[in-house]
Amino acid sequence: MTLPKDYLGAKMGMWLFLFTEILLFGGLFVLYSVTMQRYPVEFHTASQMLDVTMGTLNTVVLITSSLFAALAVIALQRGDIRRSKIFILLTILLAGVFLADKYMEWGAKIHHGIYPNSPHLTDWPEGQQAFFALYYTMTGLHGIHVVLGMGLLGWVYWLISKGKITPEQHVTLENAGLYWHLVDLIWIYLFPLFYLIT
Amino acid sequence: MSEHSTQHEGHGPGYGLFIAIWAALLVLTATTVWVAGINLGFLNVVAALAVATTKASLVIFFFMHLKYEELTLKLMVLTAFVILSIFIGMTFFDTAYR
């Protein structure tokens, strides 16, 4: 009753979508680099205000969640549905930890009056304002991707429970995994650019 | 080509390999944080991007399975990244020499 899926076609379609995501963030990375080149001192000062510990913690959390997403695919390929579902739940759980960390970071900054167009921030040099504008835009857009990824993984979990994704037809889980790894990939660049520039 | 033959080939990676990749990613994360603490001037940016790109390659080739995909898909991904680097390169040709 289920139609045979075009496995390679399904994966290519997902990768094509990921290319648009890469170019979307690519554009923002270009904007970031050009602005940093223009205000190196201000970017340095502003970057020092971010919490490296929180940023590093979130990097570890996201890399680990990416591992679980990859393990979920292997488990399903091997026919271990129960273990695959546990790995998906762990991925979603760590995505939640990432967002909680981000919430605390943003919360602390906003509490100190650092948010786009705040009276406090508009007194600062242009370069520092630009840094925080980019910080909120890029980590915010990335955060939306994390939320979407959680939804996508939740949907895949439900499909597995319903028997719509099986060890024989697992490309939907693989594609959801690809999306999740892209979220990780983008963070791998966001982290050093915002937290570590010296 | 039968989809079954594609999905059941036994050449896929196992748990152990992925855990090793994960460990490598953590070591690289520690490295980049450590290197950022040393003042190398412009080299700090180069080091941060080099480590990030190494990490990205590990994620793309292993977690995203690209290493195990067909040549067509590999070439597609390569094309996308070449376009991205042209985009970045051309922008810097402009802004760096103003």
Image (tube, rainbow, N blue to C red):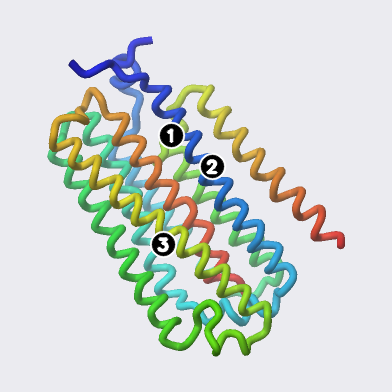
Nearer-N-terminus badge (3/1) = 1
Name the amino acid type tagged 1.
Met
Q: CA distance from mark 2 to mark 1?
A: 10 Å
Pinpoint residue A60: horizontal percent, then vertical percent: 37, 61
Q: CA distance from mark 3 to mark 2?
A: 23 Å
Dot 1 corresponds to which residue?
A14
Depth check: B20 or B82 in front? B82
Dot 3 corresponds to which residue?
A59
The reply to whether residue A50 is in sight is yes
Pinpoint residue A34: horizontal percent, then vertical percent: 71, 63
Chain on which label 1 sits? A
User: Nearer the viewer's eye, disc 3 or disc 2?
Assistant: 2
Q: Is residue A144 above or below residue A83?
A: below
On the rendered image, what quadrant is the N terminus of chain A found in? top left
Pinpoint residue B14: horizontal percent, then vertical percent: 30, 35
Nearer-N-terminus badge (3/2) = 2
Name the amino acid type tagged 3.
Thr
Residue, far right: B98
The kind of secondary structure element at disc 3 is helix
The kind of secondary structure element at disc 2 is helix
Q: Are marks 3 and 2 in contact (CB under 8 Å)?
A: no
The kind of secondary structure element at disc 1 is helix
Q: Residue at x 64, y 75 (%)?
A: A43
On the rendered image, what quadrant is the C terminus of chain A found in? bottom right
Chain on which label 2 sits? A
Dot 2 corresponds to which residue?
A20
The reply to whether residue B35 is in sight is no
Q: Is residue A142 above or below residue B88?
A: below
